[in-house]
Amino acid sequence: MGIFDWLNGATKNGTAPQAAQTTAKPAKAAHANGGDVKLEYTSESITTAMLSQLASTPDPRFKQIMEAAVRHLHAFAREVNLTPGEWIKGIDFLTRTGQACSPSRQEVILLSDTLGLSTLINTMHDKTAMEEATHSSLLGPFFREDPPKFKAGEQISQKDASDEVVLYGTVTNAKGKPLPNAIVSVWQTATDGRYDMQQEGGGMDCRGEFTTDADGKYLIRTVRPLFYSIPMDGPVGEMITAQKRHGNRPAHIHFLISAAGHREMVTALYIADDPHIMDDVVFGAHGDLIAAIKNNQPGCPVPGVNSIKFNFALSAESAADKLSGRVGADPSKIGATAH
Ligand code: BEZ
Ligand code: FE
């Protein structure tokens, strides 16, 4: 018996059960139109019916994800007794969230970040590493592929390097062995608290790619990043405002680090003493990633400057890591076929 038969209340030989016609309560209201086919969804059976249609999905992981998504989505609608008017508002919000995306803006990632979903996924992903490594943090919506390449010690801020900060340290494996030739990609706001993508012209600035030396050391000159508000002029900003959240992120510097045979690391350093460390609107700040800018640190390769020293530890790479991807992407690469 297929799902359609089951909904019709038919028996194996195709005839409707007699009991259905002899119950005391009329099967249909007196004013009802339509034929005799018994096809009725209740607020519970619609979930079973939808899950039955998913049974034909060939890809087992896609099937598992969709089944759980449908169960939770339906349970959510039941829990809050969602009205048609409320859901159309949700549809309007989701539609505008998609429409706000462009090659330089990713409003859907912003939604995932502000709902804590990106950090949840990162936290679960960290737990699956073969070895304990430096914590991950959000890639965020301002990552761009193919940044300019720099030599050790070069300055990545092209417009204003007045408040210079030197970043230095070692990239190691989980046991502390230095990793030479690791690629260290870095990006951050300029001193005005804006990313290059938020500025006129759209050229790349305050981002770049470095390579660790034979001792696994990296050396980057940059500027002091500022805490800043996530983009509030779109639908996600409307949501944040309606929730009376401040919308700020603590000052931070993003890193994407890769080394052969090791799990790629997406993380960020958060500047100690920033006022928004404890209430980051996207939950990216993490205790282990808080780093102080110190003046004239002993051991800093550039004497007499403000600097951050931070060592990054990478886990060995598993076969699954090769397929796990990142929470986030260069906005110009998402939905690229639609642009
Ligand atoms: C950022 O790191 O810049 C960022 C991350 C998530 C949402 C918005 C901004
Ligand atoms: Fe950021």
Image (spheres, grey):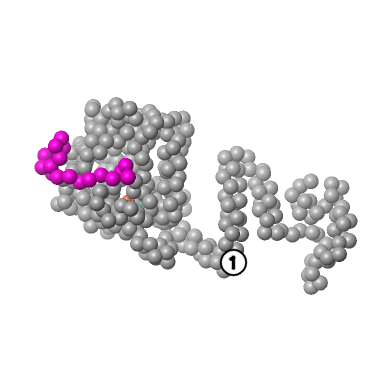
Q: Quadrant of residue 312?
A: top left
Was residue 288 drawn as part of the magenta stretch in this picture? yes
In-image side of 108 versus 212 (left or right): right
The residue lying at 52 percent from left, 63 percent from top is: 90
Relative depth, front residue between 287 and 133? 287
Relative depth, front residue between 171 and 15? 171
The residue lying at 25 percent from left, 48 percent from top is: 272
Determine crowd level at label 1: few under 14, some 14-19, many 20+ residues with C-alpha closer than 10 A: few
Q: Which residues are magenta?
A: 287-305
The residue lying at 79 percent from left, 59 percent from top is: 38
Residue 180: x and y in percent read 27, 28
* Element assignment for label 1: loop
The residue lying at 59 percent from left, 66 percent from top is: 83
Residue placed under numbered mark 1 in the picture? 83
Task: Inspect this view and state whether residue 139 appears.
Answer: no
In-image side of 40 versus 197 (left or right): right
User: From the viewer's perspective, is residue 156 above or below residue 181?
Assistant: below
Was residue 210 drawn as part of the magenta stretch in this picture? no
User: From the viewer's perspective, is residue 82 above or below residue 70?
Assistant: below
